Image: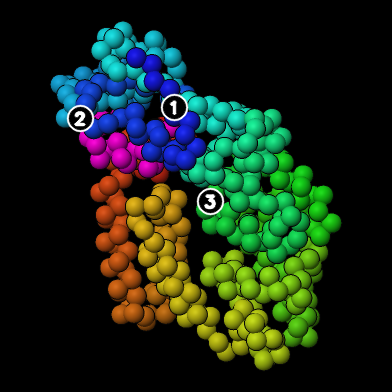
C-alpha cells in the first residue's frame, strides 16, 4: 500500500507525518523518505515513545544485520526501515512483508518550489508549515520570498535599516543556523541594495558569528567613545549603527548585552553617557564579570522556564554555551555558587528529562553534523 503525505495546511507538519505511524498496529513498516521527514526531532521522539525502532542503513549487509537483530517484529515491538530511494530497492522480503509508505515534501508544500523547501532544516520546515500555504503556486523567486518571510522571519523592509539587520542577525546566530545557498544569495542581494547599509559587506555578518559580534562591538565602542569625548580607534567598517538617534537600537541594547554580542566598554566617567546606554559601559574600577554573570543567569532561567517538550537540540546547544560561560565566571570570581545552585539543579533536572525522551532517537540518526560521540567517525569518513 502506498501512502502519501497529508496536505491539510492547518495540521502541523510533524503531526501529519506521525499520522502514518499509529502505535501497536503494524509490526514492520518500510518508508521511502527522500526528504528526511522522519529525521525531525519531534517526529523521531514520538516514534521512539510509541516503541518504534527506526533503521536507516545504506549498506545492505549492515541493514540485514540490524533488521535481524530486532526480530521478532511485532505490533508491540515495531520496526521502521527507511530508505531515501525507491521502496522496491529494499530487500524483497522486507518490501513484501512491510506496510509501505512514501513521504515527500511536495505533498506538504505543493505550491512552493521543491528545491527551495528541500534545502531547509527540519525546524524551518515545521515553521513554514505552520504558516500555511500561499494562495497560489509560486515560482522559485516568489518561493524564496515566502520562505524567508515565514521560515526565517525576514522582512525586506525591516532589513533595510541597520537596527532591523542587527535584530535579525542576533536571532539568526543565537539559533546557529546556516542559510541555504539560494536563500542566502537572495538576502544578500536585498541588503546590498539597501541605501542605509551602503559601504557595509553583509556577507561575513551572516556567515560568521564572530565577524558579526566584532562588527557590533566596534560600532558600540565608536558610539561610546564619541559620547564620552575620548579618542576613537579606526575600525574596518563605517559607523552606521547610529545608537545615539536610533531608538530601536537603544531598546535592543539589553538583548545584545544579554547574548554577549556587545561587551560593556570601559570609560572614565559613565555619567557622561545617557541613561539608556549606561548598562553597556563600565567605570575603570568596575568588575564587569558580576554583571555578565547576572545577565547569563537571567537568560538561562528564561530558557529553562520554557516548555521542555518544545525544546530542541539547537536550544540545548545555546543553553550549553551560556552555562559554560557562567561556570567559568563562577570559578574566576570564586563566588555566587549559592545563588546559582537552584539554577544548576533546574538545568540538571530538565536536561535529564529531555535526554530520557530524546537521546535514543537522536543518537540513531546519521546527521550532516555530529552531535553524539559515535557520530564522529562517520562524519570524519
CB within 8 Å, label 3 to label 1: no
Q: Residues within 10 Å of mark 1 (few under 14, many from 20)?
A: some
Q: Which residue is mark 2?
A: 24
Q: Which mark is residue 5?
A: 1
Q: Is residue 97 above or below residue 125?
A: above
Secondary structure of the residue carrying numbered label 1:
loop
Query: What x and y, as percent, mark residue 53?
Result: 26, 30
Instruction: Give the x, y percent position of residue 170.
Output: 60, 60
Main SS, magenta region, reads: helix
Instruction: Give the residue displayed 78% in from the left and 80% down from the top.
Output: 226
* Residue stretch in magenta: 35-54
Question: Which circle, 3 or 1, is nearer the viewer?
Answer: 1
- Residue closest to the far top: 92
The residue that mark 3 highlights is 176
Q: Quadrant of residue 117?
A: top right
> Based on the displayed image, in which of its 4 quarters is residue 236 positioned?
bottom right
Amino acid at each position: 500500500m502506498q501512502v502519501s503525505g497529508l496536505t491539510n495546511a492547518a495540521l502541523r507538519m510533524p503531526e501529519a507525518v506521525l499520522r502514518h505511524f499509529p502505535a501497536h498496529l503494524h509490526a514492520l513498516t518500510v518508508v521511502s523518505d527522500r526528504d528526511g521527514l522522519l529525521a525531525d526531532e519531534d517526529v523521531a521522539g514520538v516514534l521512539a515513545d510509541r516503541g518504534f525502532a527506526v533503521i536507516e542503513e545504506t549498506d545492505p549487509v549492515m541493514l540485514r544485520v540490524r533488521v535481524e537483530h530486532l526480530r521478532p517484529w511485532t505490533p508491540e515491538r515495531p520496526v521502521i526501515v527507511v530508505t531515501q530511494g525507491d521502496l522496491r530497492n529494499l530487500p524483497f522480503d522486507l518490501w513484501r512483508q512491510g506496510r509501505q509508505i512514501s513521504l515527500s515534501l511536495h505533498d506538504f508544500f505543493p505550491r512552493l518550489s521543491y528545491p527551495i523547501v528541500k534545502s531547509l532544516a527540519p525546524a524551518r520546515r515545521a515553521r513554514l508549515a505552520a504558516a500555511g500555504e500561499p494562495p497560489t503556486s509560486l515560482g522559485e523567486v516568489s518561493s524564496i520570498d515566502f520562505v524567508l518571510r515565514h521560515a526565517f522571519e525576514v522582512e525586506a523592509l525591516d532589513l533595510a535599516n541597520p537596527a532591523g539587520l542587527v535584530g535579525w542577525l542576533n536571532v539568526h546566530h543565537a539559533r546557529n543556523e546556516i542559510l541555504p545557498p539560494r536563500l542566502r544569495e537572495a538576502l544578500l542581494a536585498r541588503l546590498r541594495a539597501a541605501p542605509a547599509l551602503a559601504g557595509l559587506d553583509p556577507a561575513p555578518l551572516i556567515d560568521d558569528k564572530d565577524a558579526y559580534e566584532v562588527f557590533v562591538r566596534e560600532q558600540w565602542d565608536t558610539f561610546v567613545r564619541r559620547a564620552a569625548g575620548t579618542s576613537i580607534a579606526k575600525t574596518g567598517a563605517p559607523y552606521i549603527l547610529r545608537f545615539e538617534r536610533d531608538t530601536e537600537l537603544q531598546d535592543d541594547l539589553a538583548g545584545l548585552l544579554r547574548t554577549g554580542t556587545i561587551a560593556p566598554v570601559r570609560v572614565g566617567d559613565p555619567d557622561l553617557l545617557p541613561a539608556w546606554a549606561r548598562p553597556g559601559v563600565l567605570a575603570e574600577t568596575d568588575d564587569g564579570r558580576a554583571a555578565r554573570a547576572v545577565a547569563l543567569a537571567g537568560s538561562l532561567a528564561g530558557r529553562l522556564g520554557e516548555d521542555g517538550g518544545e525544546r530542541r537540540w539547537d536550544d540545548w546547544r545555546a543553553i550549553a554555551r551560556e552555562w559554560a560561560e557562567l561556570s567559568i565566571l563562577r570559578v574566576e570570581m570564586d563566588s555566587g555558587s549559592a545563588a546559582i545552585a537552584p539554577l544548576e539543579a533546574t538545568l540538571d533536572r530538565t536536561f535529564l528529562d529531555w535526554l530520557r525522551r530524546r537521546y535514543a532517537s537522536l543518537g540513531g540518526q546519521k546527521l550532516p553534523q555530529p552531535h553524539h560521540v559515535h557520530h564522529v567517525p562517520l562524519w570524519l569518513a
